[in-house]
Amino acid sequence: MTGIPKGEGPGLLKAQLAHCSNQRAYLPSDNMAKAKMAQQDTSTLAQGCFGKVYKVKYGDQWACVKRVPVDCISETDLVREYKVYRKAKHANVVRLLGDPWVKDLKWNIPLEFISGEELETTIFYPHKSKIKLNRFVQASIISGMCAGLTYLHSKDIVHQDIKPDNIMVEHETHRAIIIDLGLAKFFRDGISSARNLGNLAYSAPEILQQHAVRDQRSDVWAMGKVIAELCIGERLLTHTVTPSNIQSILSGNPYRRAVSKMVDSNPATRASMMTVSDKILRAIDEILRELLKLIVPVLDCDCLNHVRCCCKIQHKHTP
Ligand SMILES: Nc1ncnc2c1ncn2[C@@H]1O[C@H](COP(=O)(O)OP(=O)(O)OP(=O)(O)O)[C@@H](O)[C@H]1O
Ligand SMILES: [Mg+2]
């Protein structure tokens, strides 16, 4: 929940909390049991700007519980974040496991536990990463994070804080999962439900220069920058991320066309996730064909038929 300003005061919530001896509020009964379980067997996963993230046993599964002090987030913001999580159900977006509850003056938000690492580590700290990046792993990450963002946009949700720290990659499967919907907002008919916050390094030109409201188009720009950085393995300076620079930085790279459309400095002509998805799939198709060229000579007949079948499925997406 990067950037949620302090000092707004939880108001009604504080009164509620005093009444409930700081032990329970906003806690549906079935979650009480889970909350109790959550007291056992915890380990700290990360210290965020406004709270800590723990790995916790939640019922019979592991969960990631974000604990945010109640005076760091207003009830309005918490309820908004909760609604966004509840609305988002997609394999590439972190899942909310149940209703948040208050304990010891902290909000507890139970999320699907992802056994993996931040994309930040994968790209910029390869010595710490457990993921060996190659074109095929990159393809899995890119298709996953684009599918997640396309889904959020289809639900009128703007993430607002797309950056490599807010994308996790599962170690075993290389599934990419968008996390940290703390700043996400609903955006319908030009009316936004949240403040304009987010990381400046991944902010589109209209945000930096004209202080425009973050919307789907600024998410697309940020995702374009993340894909470019993933492809070259280097951090790019924000002002250097332009379509013409991307054309030369990603020269010969199949994602070049898609990414250059994503970082168009004019939000009015910038690609949407919906329109760019097709280009991304074509790029991935190109990469898969290369893989096929490598493996076909060693496949037996059954395997080959299976691969041909998969290719037909792929072609359905890329007419
Ligand atoms: N569902 C999850 N499963 C496993 N680890 C997670 C999960 N969600 C978050 N984390 C870990 O906790 C870190 C912080 O989580 P998140 O980004 O949601 O909170 P934050 O308050 O925004 O932190 P920061 O302000 O530092 O970005 C993540 O970068 C990741 O390492
Ligand atoms: Mg974060």
Image (tube, grey):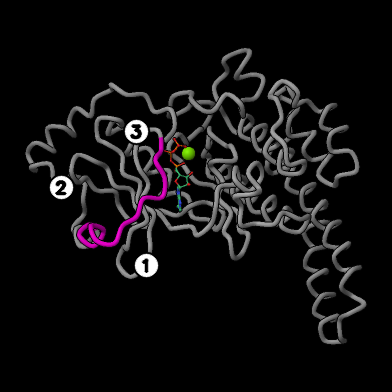
Q: How far across and down, in percent of the image, does residue 254 sit?
A: 85, 47
What's the CA distance linking mark 1 and mark 2? 23 Å
Which residues are drawn in magenta? 35-48
Which amino acid, mark 2?
Arg
Which amino acid, mark 1?
Gln
In which quadrant is the C terminus drawn?
bottom right
In this rendering, position of residue 226 left or right of residue 309 = left
* Residue 183 against residue 151 in the figure, above or below: above
Element under disc 2: loop
Q: How far across and down, in percent of the image, does residue 294 sit?
A: 89, 69
Q: How far across and down, in percent of the image, does residue 81 sit?
A: 39, 40
Task: Read off the residue under disc 3.
Answer: 77
Based on the displayed image, in which of its 4 quarters is residue 208 positioned?
top right
Question: Which numbered disc flags the more N-terminal residue, 2 or 3?
Answer: 2
Which amino acid, mark 3?
Asp
* Residue 98 against residue 23 in the figure, above or below: below
What's the CA distance linking mark 1 and mark 3? 27 Å
Question: Which numbered disc flags the more N-terminal residue, 1 or 2?
Answer: 2
Element under disc 3: helix
Question: Which numbered disc flags the more N-terminal residue, 1 or 3?
Answer: 1
Q: Residue at x 31, y 44 (%)?
A: 67
Q: Residue at x 15, y 47 (%)?
A: 24
Task: Read off the residue under disc 2.
Answer: 24
* Marks 1,3: beta carbons within 8 A: no
What's the CA distance linking mark 2 and mark 3? 19 Å
Residue lying at the far front of the rendered structure: 127
Task: Read off the residue under disc 1.
Answer: 61
Q: Please state which of residues 255 and 86 is positioned toward the viewer in this rendering.
A: 255
* Residue 209 against residue 234 in the figure, above or below: above
In this rendering, position of residue 44 left or right of residue 301 = left
